[in-house]
Amino acid sequence: MNVKRLERLAKLLDQQTDSCPIKFNLASWGTYKKIEDNICGTAACAVGLACFNEDFNAEGLGFKNHWAGNGQIVPTFNGSNGWSAVSEFFGITKEAAAHLFHQNHYESRRVVGVSGAAMVAARIREEIKKHQEK
C-alpha cells in the first residue's frame, strides 16, 4: 500500500467545496468538456480527481479518453488502464481499490458532492489505519 499517495488523495478530497470546478461524483472515473483552455462541466470520482491533479500526473498517473470526443476518461499508469492502473499506482489490490473507489461499495451508492468526497476520504484513512496496525 502506497500510504503517502493515499494520504495525499484523502487531502485532495478534503479540499472539495461546492465552488470547485471539478465536481465530485463517484459514479464514474470522470467526464469533462474542454472549452478553449477551461475544463467546464467536469465531474470525477476520487481517482478521476487524482488523474486531473498535477502532482499525481508528475508521478505518472494520467488518463486517456475512453470514447473519443465525449470526454469520458479512464485512468492510466505505467502502461496499465482502469482498475489495474489504480491498484498499481496506489499499491493495493483491485478488490481494495473497488472497496475504496467504486460506488457499489458504499451504502448510499449516490456518493456525490462535498459530503461524498468526505465519505471516501474517511474510508481511505480507515484503510490506512488498518494497514498500519498490522
Image (cartoon, helix red, strand yellow):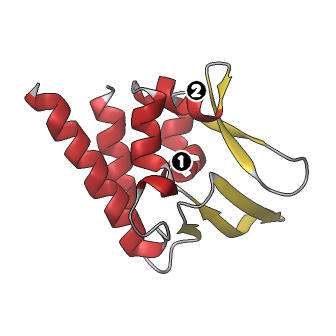
Q: Where is residue 82 in the image (x, y as percent from the top left)?
A: 64, 35
Residue at far top of view: 79
Is 99 left, or right, of 38 in this rendering?
left
Work out whether residue 103 can be spotted. yes
> Residue type at mark 2?
Ser
Q: Mark 1 vs mark 2: which is more N-terminal? A: 1
Distance between the Cα atoms at labels 1 and 2? 19 Å
**Above or below 106: residue 74:** above
> Residue type at mark 1?
Asn
Residue at left offset 58%, top offset 44%: 51
Q: Where is residue 47 in the image (x, y as percent from the top left)?
A: 52, 47
Work out whether residue 14 can be spotted. no
Q: How crowded is mark 2: few (under 14 residues within 10 Å), some or many (20 or more)?
A: some
Q: Mark 2 falls on what kind of element?
A: helix
Q: Position of residue 33 (x, y in %)?
A: 79, 64
Residue at left offset 67%, top offset 66%: 42
Residue at left offset 63%, top offset 56%: 28
Residue 84, numbered label: 2
Residue at far right of view: 69
In the image, which is nearer the foreground, mark 1 or mark 2? 2
Residue 110, numbered label: none
Location of the N terminus by quadrant is top left
Residue 53, numbered label: 1
Is 54 left, or right, of 14 in this rendering?
right
Q: Mark 1 falls on what kind of element?
A: loop
Question: Which quadrant would residue 57 be assigned to in this image?
Answer: top right
Residue at far left of view: 133
Q: Along the line of sight, which residue is nearer the eye, 27 or 30?
A: 27
Location of the C terminus by quadrant is top left
Q: Residues within 10 Å of mark 1 (few under 14, many from 20)?
A: some
